[in-house]
Amino acid sequence: MCINLTKLCFCFLIVSNFFGIVVQAQQQKSIVQKSGNPPDFNNYYAGFEYILSGRSIRFIGKTPSSGFQLHRFYGGKKIFRHPKNLFAIYYTVSAGLFSELNYTVNDTGKEKHRYGFGISPAGYTFMIPISKEISVNAGFSGGLSTFDKLFPDKNGIPLNFTYSLNSALLIRLNQEFWLTARGRYYHHSNAEIGKVNPGLDLIMLSAGFQAQF
C-alpha cells in the first residue's frame, strides 16, 4: 500500500508539473498580448540553496528511514528562448556538499552516517516568467556522488549515480537577485554495479537565492 501510494504521489508530481507549465504558459501569453512588453531572459544564472530531505520513501530504492542535508551551488546557460519570451530552456550544472547522510542498514537496522560530495554535469530547466517579479521553472538532472566511506557498506562502490526532478518558485529582489523555493524528487543508487544496491528515494525542499546576468 505504501509503494502504491508513493507511486501515485510521484505520478501526481509529474502530471501536475506538466499541466502547471501549460497553464502558466497560457497566462504568460495573455500578459504579453495585453502589455506588449514581456519580461526578458538573462543568458546565465548562478545560485546557492540549502536542501533538507524528509525520510526516504520506498519507490525504486530499498533503504528506509534515511535522509540528508545538502548545500548546493548551481549555474545555468540559456540554450533556447521562445520568440515571444513565453519560456526559455537552460542547460544546468551543479555541485553539492552532503553535510550529513543518515541511513539505516537493511539487514541490521543500524543507523550509519556518511559525508560526501556530488556533481550534476548535465541538466535542463524549463523557465516560465509569470510576471516581472515572479517566475517558475521545472527541470531534471543527473550526476555522480561519492562519500568519505563506501555507501552503504564495504559492498558498495566509490561512485554512485543520482537523478532528480524539480520545480521551483522564484521571487525577484532586484534587477539581478531572486529568492528561490524548490521541491525535488531525488534518486540515489549504484545502478546495480555494487554487490548491494540499496538505493534512496527522497522528497526534498530547499531555499536559496539566484543571480541572473
Image (cartoon, rainbow, N blue to C red):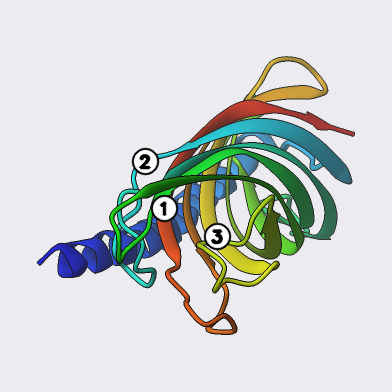
Q: Which residue is mark 3?
A: 164
24 or 79, which is in the foreground? 79
Question: Where is residue 119 drawn, in percent x and y?
Answer: 75, 55
Q: Residue at x 79, y 42 (%)?
A: 41
User: Mark 1: which amino acid?
Assistant: Leu
Lower sequence index among marks 1 and 3: 3
Q: Which residue is mark 1?
A: 202
Q: Is residue 108 left or right of residue 18?
A: left
User: Mark 2: which amino acid?
Assistant: Gly
| Label 1 close to label 3 by CB (< 8 Å) | no
Q: Residue at x 90, y 34 (%)?
A: 213
Lower sequence index among marks 2 and 1: 2
Residue 170 visible to an observer of this rendering: no
In this figure, what is the number of numbered marks?
3
Lower sequence index among marks 3 and 2: 2
Tell me the CA gap for discs 2 and 1.
7 Å
- Which element type, helix, strand or loop, lies under badge 3? strand
Q: Residue at x 76, y 34 (%)?
A: 47
Mark 1 residue crowding within 10 angstroms, few (<14) / some (14–19) / many (20+):
many
Q: Which residue is mark 2?
A: 54
Q: Please identify the quarter of the rendering in which residue 177 is found.
A: top right
208 or 162, which is in the foreground? 162
